[in-house]
Image (cartoon, rainbow, N blue to C red):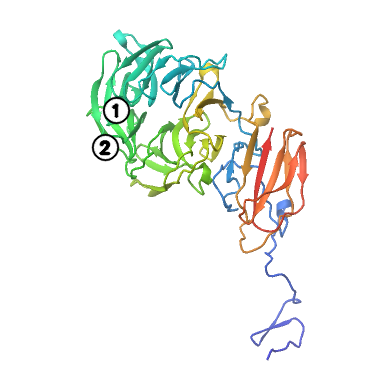
Amino acid sequence: MAGRITAQNQIRINDVIFTTTGKVREFLASQPPGKLTLGDYSDASNPYASEYSIDDLRGGIGVNILDPRTDLDRAWYATTQLRYKGRIVLPRLATLTDEGPGGDVNVLYEFKEEVYATFGTAVHVYNNTSDSWGSSLRALPNSATDAAKGLLYPSGVATLTLVIASGEDVDYATASDVWARNVLDIKYVVFWHELLWGIDNGGQLYYTDDLSSGWSTDAKLQLPTGYISGLIVARGADQEFHIYASTKTGLFIHDSVNQRFVETDMTEQPYHSDGGVGTGKWRGNIYYPAGNAIYEFQPGASTTVQTVGPDRDHGLPETRRGVIKKLLSSHNDLLAVLDASTQDGLTSVKTRVTRGIGSHHGVTLGAQKGFGLIMGWDRQGWEVKWQSGSADKPIITADVNNAYNENRMWWLSNQRVYYMVMPQDVVNPLEVPSTRYGSSGTLETPWNDMGARNQSKLALSLLLETINPSSSETVKVEYATNYTESYTTIVTKTSTGRFLSGGITPSDSHSDRSSSG
C-alpha cells in the first residue's frame, strides 16, 4: 500500500520521508539540462538548443558521422573549396584541352617550357596558343612507363635531354624535332649525380651519362620480377640525397658505394598490388601510396612512418574509393591522383616501426566503378580539387609545372588532357577577383545528432549567408534525416544576403549544400 505525505515540502521514497528545500516541481525527464552562460550571450547560449556553424571546414573531408567535440571543421565529402576560413567557394576551373589523337596518356611532362604527352605510343606537344596537340613527334615502341629530364653529356657537352622509357627501349630528345633511341628494357628513369639511372622490370639498375654510348650495370633489387613501382630521389638518414626504389613491398634505398639496395623502415608492410605506384615527395618527406592509403616516411635519426591518406577516419564515399596513381608536390598541397574506375578487393595494410611511434594501420578500401579524383592535403585536411564523371575512363597520370609561364596542374582523364591554374600562395577568394571557378560544386556535411543519440531533436532554424549568387548562379540547401539519403530542399538562394528558415523534421540530420554558377 502506497504511503502518504501529510506535510508540504516532503517526498516519500521507499517509505522514507525526505524534506525538500523548496516546492516539488514537475519537468520532462528526457529534456537535457540547461546550459549556464557567463558573460556575453550569443545564439550558442540558448539553454535548450545547440548551434552548428558550417563556415570553417579546413579540417577537410572524411567524417561521415560527426562528433561535435572534435569534428566541427570536417565535411563528409565536397567538391567545393574548403581551404578558406569563413568561406566555402566553388572549385577552381578545370580547362579541357583539344581532343588530341586519342588513346591513354601515360606520361605528361614539361620540357623546355612546353608540355609533352604520350597518346598511346605517339608523343605530342601542346600548343598553348592554338589549344592543339598537333601531329606526332615520335612513335614509341610501346606505351610509355616513365619520363625524366636532366643533363646528359654526349661528346662531353652538357645537353638538357627529355627521356621517355617504355619498358622496352628508351627514347630521348634534345628538342621537339631531335629524337633518338637507346635499346635497353628500361621501365623507370631518374636523374641523380649528373647521371641518368634506369631500372628494368626485373629490378636491375643501370646508369649512363650518354645514351648514345650505352649503360653501366649497378645494383640489383632482390625482389621478384614485376615488384618495382618506380624510382625517386630523396633525402636519406645521412641528410644526403639518394635513389629510392619504390616497390610493392615498400621502399629500398640505393647504396651507391657498395652497389646494392638496402631495406628501409618502409619495407615492413605486406605486399600490395598497387604499392608504391606514383610515390612522391613533398616538403622533405617521402609519400608512399598503397591503394588509397598514403604513408608519410621521414628518414633520419628518428625515423617516422605514419598514415596520412584520405582513407583515414571514415574514408571516402563508396564510389570515390580507388587506387592512387600518382602523388605530386605543389606550393600548398600534396596532390593525389586517385582512380576509382576499377574493381578491387579489400586489403588491410600495416606498418610497424620500432623507433618510438608504435604501430600505424592503414586500410585500402575496395575500389568500385566510379569517379577519378584529384585531391590535395595541406597537413590539416583533404580537399577534392577535381572530380571526373562517374562513367569516365581511368585517370592515369598528372604533372605540376610552370610551362607557358603559368603554374598549372595537368592531368589525363577519359583519354583527354585537362589543366588547372594553381595558386602559388594562400589566397583570400574575395581579394583575388581574377580567379576562375568551375560551374558547380557540392558540399555534403556529416550526419549530426549533436552528440545525443538517445534523444529526438528538432532543427529549429537554418541561417544561410551568401555572396553574389543570381538567378543563374544559385546556392541550394537540402537536408536528409535518419541516415537515409533522400533529400528535401529548404531553399534555393539567388541573391546576396541572409536567409533564415523555420524548423526541420526531428531526427538525425544530414545537409547537402550545392552551388552552381
Residue 21 lies left or right of residue 426; in this view the side is: right
The Cα–Cα distance between marks 1 and 2, rounded to whole angstroms, is 12 Å
Give the class, few, some or many, for how many residues have Cα within 10 Å of label 2's Cα (few <14, many ≥20): few
Residue 280, picture quadrant: top left
Pointer 1 with pointer 2, Cβ within 8 A = no
Quadrant position of the N terminus in the picture: bottom right
Q: Which mark is residue 224?
A: 2
Image position of 314 with respect to 193: above or below: below
Residue with the mark numbered 1 = 200
Image position of 71 with respect to 192: above or below: below
Which amino acid type is shown beneath numbered disc 2? Pro
Which secondary structure, mark 2? loop
Give the class, few, some or many, for how many residues have Cα within 10 Å of label 1's Cα (few <14, many ≥20): many
Residue 267 lies left or right of residue 343; in this view the side is: left
- From the top left corner, tell me how far across and down residue 217 is, in percent: 23, 24
- The residue lying at 56 percent from left, 27 percent from top is 422
Which amino acid type is shown beneath numbered disc 1? Asp
- Of 91 and 367, nearer the camera is 367
- The residue lying at 76 percent from left, 37 percent from top is 494
From where the camera sits, is residue 284 visible?
no
- From the top left corner, tell me how far across and down residue 152 is, in percent: 34, 14
- From the top left corner, tell me how far across and down residue 163 is, in percent: 37, 19
From where the camera sits, is residue 267 visible?
yes
Q: Which mark is residue 324?
A: none
